[in-house]
Amino acid sequence: METTNKISFNRRSFIKTIGLSTGGLMIGFTLFEACKPDSNVMIDLETLNYKDFNAFIKIAENGMVTIYSPNPEIGQGVKTSMPMLIAEELDVPWEHVLVKQADLDTKNFQRQVAGGSQSIRASWMPLRQTGATARQILINAAAIKWGVNPSECYTEEGIIKNSRGEKLSYGAVVSEAALLEVPENVKLKDPKDFKIIGKDIKNVDIDKIISGKPLFGLDYKTEGMVYAVTLRPPAFGQKLVSFDDTEARNVNGVTDVFQFGDKVAVLATNTWAAMNGKKALIAEWSSDEKLMSTEDHDMELTKLLDSESLKEVRSDGNIDRVKNTADKVIEYTYEAPFLPHSCMEPMNFFAHVTDTNVELVGPIQTPEGTARQVAGMLKRDVEQVHLSLTRIGGGFGRRLIGDYVVEAAEISNISKKPVKLVYTREDDMAGGFYRPIVKYKISAAIKNSKLVGYHLKETAVGSSINRSRASYFPAGCVENYKVEAAQLPSEITTGPWRAPVCNFLATAEQTFIDELAEELNQDPVALRLELLEKGKKNKADLEWSPERMIGVIKLAAEKSNWGNAKEGVYQGFSAYYSHNSHVAEVAEVVLRDGKPVVTKVFCAVDCGVVVNPLGAKNQIEGGIIDGIGHAMYGEMRFLKGKPQSLNYDSYRLIRMMETPVVETYFVDSNEDPTGLGEPSLPPVGAAIANAIKAATGQRYRIQPYLKYMEQVSEIV
């Protein structure tokens, strides 16, 4: 169906003509304001220079189109998929499109962020309107040239045609188009007419990635730049008492050493010299006697679970009453450890601070917030900070936090040099913001063989459940439902980790649903469907859709041949809603030498319109494999605040030979797109835990599973 959008912004808010070297037209506008129906643009783009465009289309006279992608590219594919939306409505062949990364533009962008799997969701209509409005202006220009009504004209792959059979390329009318008013109404394509959206499009950077061309922050170099590494406290909570830099300054290539805060910066002409200079430092730190170890956190979280410190997050009905009158109450506790982010590209950033300007270049998920942090640290006007984005070699939430960017700017400001700060792998592992250690205690009240009450308690370090996630399944499906949570203070820094909170909450809840099904002697899939039917009748305060969840559950069950696996294959089920998408998964496990091995995962996804199926599958499969790896093997332990794993010789990641086959199925939908980078990870922990239970009879409630499997084997 054709969609009409009334746009009320003037020509100067949309079009700007500049002297391109090849001749052409630059088109841009404020994506997240100007494209909204009946909204007005306050910023006059005609007064801005080339780099002040929010997102724009450059059309050259030779017919090539350059589309600038505004959001950080973190491996989630937005540098490909966001321009696809513009190109679709602009109606140009994808092979004629060049894609470039836009810099930070705080004047025109409203959400220049890579986080929460929201880039496409937030940009779906604005970016399509970008292309559609540009296409209509070009049509209007051609119609004037021909002396016909624009309604007699249409476009096909960068060519404007009319009913008389005449043709003009976009490049042939760009100069005339620059003089026209922006139309008040533009028509978006009917999804059935999409030529680019819904097609497999390869990553626009793939050729550069595989051939080693400079794309990432670590690749960035500039004349006169020095490299910096930093010595940090060995344990969270320790302070620098003193340091001796005599030997460090004798290292060939080291140019400077100085203290800032509780850290010591070593500057050198190359990273090797900087790292060796750091190793040569002799430092004295404050005592670690009072700092907490992993066992201390574990003990305190357990105490919190039944303490008065728990705060009510959501309460439906009367959970205490139904527990007291139930035929039976079952209760289990689920535990997950601290986890580092393990980005392939360690933290790094370039900074050059002068009296009048702050230049920043590198990989960051939150460029605007980070630029403001740097400005605040330097006591500068944020307009003095210019931040250019590179491709990001992994983030998973770690690069939402711009501490390393602030650090680079501080070192540059002190040294008065352009500085490239580089973390070693050990710096990255030991100086991170970790996924918090967490415990969930879940209980269910059963009456007449039915679930009548559900009670979730959460205790975590530095992160607690919020009301939104307290409204996820099974909220709305159980009349008596309560969620409580408490936080444990710690010197250890925690922060967002892929699919924050949901990443283990889903494991706990979906494992518990299987335990409940076993108690009720029901098929796990049948129990979920039964609960969801109740949810369909009670949609109050639910952002997720019981109908869409039912859809993915049935699709996953069908594709996996649920309940009819081959002999020797054991299945586990899980389904979860996060980042606006509904996902169901079936994990298959076999026993090899008596040990469970995950061989296959079936995944059903309802994420609305799938913009780029190739990229979407990569996101789903990557999330599942990442989730399996951390559920089975991942654990960061601390001894008196000191990380016990500093590199991959002591921190276990999933290996190539351990990755299962993943079959992904998308629900055919015309709904607006939702998240993809994170939603496939949360369900998989429970899917494999439930499959392992089917295979071995052992129920694992503590991650990493492999560690506790080995402990059980030793006991046996």
Image (spheres, rainbow, N blue to C red):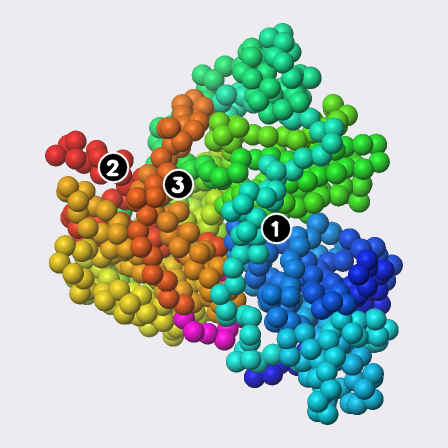
Q: Secondary structure at mark 2?
A: helix
Residue ID at (65%, 26%) = 227
Residue that carries the numbered disc 1 in the rendered image = 72
Q: Does 670 appear in magenta?
A: yes
Q: Compare residues 324 and 459 and report the one nearer the observer.
A: 459
Q: Secondary structure at mark 1?
A: loop
| Foreground tag (3 vs 1) | 1
Q: Are marks 3 and 1 in contact (CB under 8 Å)?
A: no
Q: Are marks 2 and 3 in contact (CB under 8 Å)?
A: no
Residue that carries the numbered disc 3 in the rendered image = 438
Residue ID at (41%, 68%) = 666
Image x and y of residue 682, in percent: 39, 52
Give the amino acid at mark 2. Tyr
Q: Compare residues 637 and 620 and report the one nearer the observer.
A: 620
Give the amino acid at mark 1. Pro
Image x and y of residue 396, in percent: 50, 45
Res 287 visible: yes
| Foreground tag (2 vs 3) | 2
Residue ID at (46%, 50%) = 499
For label 1, count other residues whose C-alpha is less than 10 Å away and answer few (under 14), some (14-19) or many (20+). Answer: many
Relative to 226, 696 lies left or right: left
N-terminal of the pair, mark 2 or mark 3, is 3
Q: Are marks 1 and 2 in contact (CB under 8 Å)?
A: no
Quadrant in which the N terminus appears: bottom right
Q: CA distance from mark 3 to mark 1?
A: 30 Å
Residue that carries the numbered disc 2 in the rendered image = 708
Please give the range of residues in magenta.
667-675
For label 2, count other residues whose C-alpha is less than 10 Å away and answer few (under 14), some (14-19) or many (20+). Answer: some
